[in-house]
């Protein structure tokens, strides 16, 4: 008899609230917590929007005071953004922090909140499983994209000016206690943003499923996320108003992130991070550029999961299924469009080799292997 393999599973979010229109329940959460001092971090795309005014009004009524608001700049977060967010949080001395936006907004808020009780600044507190102190506030994450899954992970990624490597965080003090998933908030996303963020979630699902650190708890979540995104992401891109597609993509993004919180990721994300840091490529697009070549490199090491992935992607092999999906959502872009020279491609491979994602990749890779994958991305 084959015994189940030993595993460790981590998940720090206490509650996931999902449903169309449920952002209206923020006031209920605030009252239930007895909150009196609230701060709202919101993506700058929603600055002075109907959504911002509605949330502020609900929180003001629920807490009896006007929440402070920080609008997170529309770029991948760096230390400067985190410091500005932290300054607003510190001024509010909050017992409730709400973050509304994509992964950049949520990651910035997660690190800024942790800085309230862990001295030293954003760079000093970076790292994996550092024993950080938790802040006492109720922390609520409200994603407006179906991509990073930051609302349900213990991790965050923050850029540093002049560096090809981003600061990575993993801590039990980092995650939201409540993830409030309202797919209605994704209706305004243009098709390109839906494709970028959705392909990021798809990459999380695939890399999490085949990771060396995947286990019996993570695999079903990754597998279902793969299925949902293969079936529904093209629909959401082609018809942004399709409610079912928006719902299924948001659920898949959340499931993939709960899985990768334990399983971690692999070579594709090791390449995507420096593509963003060094060449300013949007994260989801960076994953789309890398994933077909990475999957072709890895798929002989997928073992029994190889035919499962091929079937989920309705393709003869995993790499072909990935390439087909990328084409369907309009992201069939070669590396030469963003990294046109050999020196840049060398630097990209070198940066990927220093990534903390590499030990979780299903296949060992030396610099020469990664450089060959980079060449195949062209």
Image: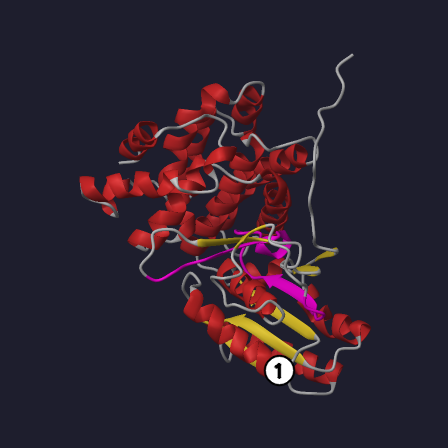
The magenta stretch spans residue 138: yes
Which residue is drawn at the image coordinates 48% and 60% (left, top)? 189
In the structure shown, which secondary structural element does the residue marked by tag 1 occupy? helix
Name above or below for residue 257 compared with residue 90: above
Boundaries of the magenta span: 135-161
The 10 Å Cα crowd at callout 1, few under 14, some 14 to 19, many 20 or more, is: some
Which residue is drawn at the image coordinates 58% and 33% (left, top)? 209
Left or right relative to 221: residue 277: left
Q: Which residue is mark 1?
A: 92
Q: Nearer the viewer, residue 149 or 260?
A: 260
Residue 169 point in image, percent of width and height: 54, 54
Name above or below for residue 324 compared with residue 144: above
Q: Quadrant of residue 15?
A: bottom right
Q: Nearer the viewer, residue 60 or 124?
A: 124
Which residue is drawn at the image coordinates 34% and 32% (left, top)? 370
The magenta stretch spans residue 307: no
Q: Quadrant of residue 271?
A: top left
- The colour mode here is secondary structure
Residue 254 seen in the current view: yes
Residue 248 point in image, percent of width and height: 62, 47
Residue 288 seen in the current view: no
Name above or below for residue 39 compared with residue 127: below
Left or right relative to 148: residue 181: right
Question: Which part of the image, by quadrant, shows the C terminus?
Answer: top left
């Amino acid at each position: 008899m084959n015994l189940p393999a030993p595993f460790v599973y981590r998940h720090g979010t206490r509650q996931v609230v999902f449903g169309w229109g449920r952002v209206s329940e923020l006031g209920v959460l605030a009252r239930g917590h007895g909150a009196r001092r609230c701060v709202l971090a919101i993506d700058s795309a929603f600055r002075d929007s109907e959504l911002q005014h509605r949330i502020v009004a609900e929180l003001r009524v629920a807490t009896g005071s006007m929440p402070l608001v920080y609008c997170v700049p529309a770029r991948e977060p760096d230390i400067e953004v985190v410091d500005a967010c932290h300054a607003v949080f510190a001024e509010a001395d909050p017992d409730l922090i709400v973050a509304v936006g994509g992964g950049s907004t949520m990651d910035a808020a997660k690190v800024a909140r942790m800085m309230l009780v862990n001295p030293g600044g954003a760079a000093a507190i970076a790292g994996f499983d550092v024993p950080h102190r938790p802040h006492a506030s109720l922390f609520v994450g409200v994603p407006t994209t179906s991509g990073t899954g930051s609302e349900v992970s213990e991790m965050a990624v923050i850029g540093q000016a002049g560096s090809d490597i981003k600061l990575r965080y993993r801590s039990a003090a980092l995650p939201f206690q409540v993830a409030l998933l309202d797919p209605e908030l994704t209706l305004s996303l243009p098709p390109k943003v839906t494709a970028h963020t959705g392909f990021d979630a798809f990459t999380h699902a695939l890399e999490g499923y085949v990771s060396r650190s995947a286990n019996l708890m993570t695999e079903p979540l990754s597998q279902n996320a793969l299925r949902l995104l293969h079936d529904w992401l093209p629909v959401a891109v082609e018809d942004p108003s399709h409610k079912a597609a928006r719902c299924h993509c948001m659920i898949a993004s959340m499931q993939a992130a709960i899985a990768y919180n334990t399983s971690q990721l692999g070579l594709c994300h090791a390449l995507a991070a420096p593509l963003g840091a060094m060449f300013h490529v949007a994260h989801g697009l960076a994953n789309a550029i890398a994933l077909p070549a990475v999957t072709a490199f890895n798929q002989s090491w997928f073992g029994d999961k190889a035919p499962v992935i091929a079937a989920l992607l309705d393709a003869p092999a995993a790499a072909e299924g990935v390439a087909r999906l990328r084409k369907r959502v309009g992201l069939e872009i070669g590396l030469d469009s963003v990294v046109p020279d050999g020196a840049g491609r060398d630097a990209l491979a070198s940066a990927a080799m220093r990534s903390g994602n590499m030990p979780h990749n299903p296949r060992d890779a030396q610099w020469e292997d990664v450089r060959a994958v980079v060449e195949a991305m062209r």
